[in-house]
Image: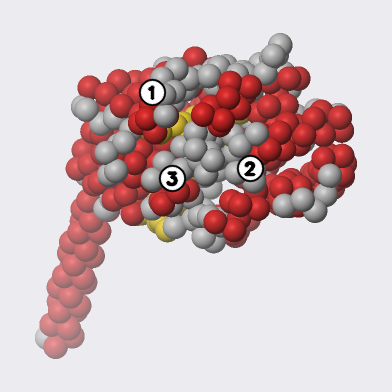
């Protein structure tokens, strides 16, 4: 009897175990069904950008309860090194905000990121021109979709110019020399001193970019010398303060917050369209308005001269375990009205015409941004090479420009050093990527 009882107990126990396992299996299966797919999104920026992006993530998760987006964000400092470490180790986020020049290191042959052409059924690209999408196209593979486009621009304090009788903007650099003579001695119509500003002038004269797509210098030594001589002429005629004055007075800070800009002594500046909003916001506090004059030209100009570049492209990791969900999220922040409104203009105005229309209709585009849109549309310009902003190349041409700006070297020496040092930097970059 005992033996039979034991056997019965074992059968019951086994049955209970089976039931428990089945129950556990059902629970696990149910849990699996309720488990969310998690994707990661990384970006850099300021607090406004973080706030808007987190808002967009929340809106996406509300519409897509089966997908969780893990936010990975910080300021700019050290972000590029962090990205380099992650990409080299294959631990990068599913969706990433990428700088234009990073593709040279991370995806020189287009194999470093997912080809977004494969997700055209998920990501709507109809609001982008073919020209814009070229920025993220490497060897026929769409590695990234640009958020915006930056154009080199001159902006001025309209109220100060009007105060001193300047009601029409000059259309030439010579015209701005005349404006400098009209303003008080300690006022400057346009602050600029970077190599990028100098090559805008050379581009007007030659119709060429400084660097080609593969990093070769398109200018002759004489072209560069002419550019430095022109810059010195702008300093001597009072159009812009000297580089030494800028370094001693402002340092490396943005002039947007300086008293010299806010009181109108620096009446204008040469910069990117993406920064206009911050300048305009600061100037409004003084009761004055920022405006965009026509881009000044040289005689017999072969191009508008204004350099253009894509800003903050979005890429998907080739290692992503959930590329379709990543593509769905990317489409949401680029095209969906809820995503576009949440992202706002904290990254500047989107280059996507559909997103622009959504923001304008929602009253999220201010006057200076509208002017910047029109300016960029009406300025042909030239697309900057990816090599231009790589740290090694930028250091090379910036150091030479600073030396010239403070009077340490001549224009001829500056031109020669630019060619030598930039060629060496490009060679170094290529040796690491090949």
From the top left corner, tell me how far across and down residue 281 is, in percent.
32, 41
Residue picked out by circle 3: 261
Residue picked out by circle 1: 371
Of the image marks 2 and 1, the number of the one nearer the N terminus: 2
Please state if 265 lies on the left or on the right of 241 as rendered: left
Residue lying at the far top in this picture: please name it. 300
Is residue 216 among what the camera can see?
A: no
Secondary structure beneath label 2: loop
Secondary structure beneath label 1: helix
Q: Nearer the viewer, mark 3 or mark 1?
A: 3
Residue at 29% in and 30% down: 366
State the mark number for residue 193. Answer: 2
Of the image marks 3 and 1, the number of the one nearer the N terminus: 3
From the top left corner, tell me how far across and down residue 24 is, in percent.
21, 63
Q: Nearer the viewer, residue 317 or 32?
A: 317
Residue lying at the far bottom in this picture: please name it. 2
Figure quadrant of residue 219 = top right
From the top left corner, tell me how far across and down residue 72 is, in percent.
40, 56
Of the image marks 3 and 2, the number of the one nearer the N terminus: 2
Q: Nearer the viewer, residue 310 or 57?
A: 310
Is residue 222 among what the camera can see?
A: yes
């Amino acid at each position: 009897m005992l033996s039979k009882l034991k056997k019965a107990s074992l059968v019951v126990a086994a049955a209970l175990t089976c039931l428990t396992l089945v129950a556990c299996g059902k629970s696990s299966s149910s849990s699996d069904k309720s488990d969310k797919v998690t994707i990661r999104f990384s970006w850099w920026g300021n607090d406004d950008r973080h706030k808007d992006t987190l808002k967009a993530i929340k809106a996406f998760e509300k519409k897509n309860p089966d997908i969780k987006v893990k936010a990975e964000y910080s300021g700019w400092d050290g972000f590029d090194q962090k990205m380099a470490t992650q990409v080299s180790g294959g631990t990068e986020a599913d969706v990433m905000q990428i700088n234009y020049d990073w593709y040279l290191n991370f995806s020189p042959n287009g194999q470093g990121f997912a080809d977004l052409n494969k997700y055209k059924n998920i990501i709507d690209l109809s609001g982008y021109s073919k020209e814009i999408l070229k920025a993220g196209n490497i060897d026929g593979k769409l590695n990234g979709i640009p958020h915006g486009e930056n154009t080199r621009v001159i902006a001025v304090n309209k109220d100060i110019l009007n105060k001193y009788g300047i009601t029409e903007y000059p259309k030439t650099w010579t015209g701005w020399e005349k404006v400098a003579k009209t303003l008080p001695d300690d006022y400057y119509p346009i602050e600029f001193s970077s190599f990028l500003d100098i090559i805008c002038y050379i581009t007007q004269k030659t119709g060429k970019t400084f660097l080609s797509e593969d990093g070769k210098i398109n200018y002759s030594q004489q072209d560069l010398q002419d550019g430095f001589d022109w810059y010195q002429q702008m300093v001597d005629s009072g159009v812009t303060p000297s580089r030494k004055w800028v370094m001693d007075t402002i340092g490396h800070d943005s002039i947007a917050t300086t008293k010299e800009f806010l009181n109108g002594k620096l009446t204008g500046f040469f910069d990117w369209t993406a920064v206009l909003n911050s300048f305009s916001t600061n100037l409004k506090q003084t009761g004055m308005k920022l405006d965009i004059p026509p881009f000044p030209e040289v005689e017999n100009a072969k191009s508008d001269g204004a350099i253009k570049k894509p800003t903050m492209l979005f890429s998907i990791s080739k290692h992503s375990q959930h590329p379709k969900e990543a593509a769905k999220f990317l489409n949401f922040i680029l095209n969906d009205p809820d995503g576009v409104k949440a992202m706002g203009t904290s990254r500047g105005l989107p280059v996507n015409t559909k997103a622009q229309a959504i923001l304008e209709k929602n009253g999220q585009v201010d006057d200076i941004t509208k002017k910047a849109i029109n300016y960029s549309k009406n300025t042909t310009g030239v697309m900057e090479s990816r090599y231009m902003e790589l740290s090694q190349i930028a250091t090379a041409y910036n150091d030479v420009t600073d030396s010239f700006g403070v009077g340490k070297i001549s224009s001829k020496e500056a031109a020669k050093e630019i060619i030598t040092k930039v060629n060496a930097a490009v060679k170094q970059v290529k040796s690491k990527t090949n």
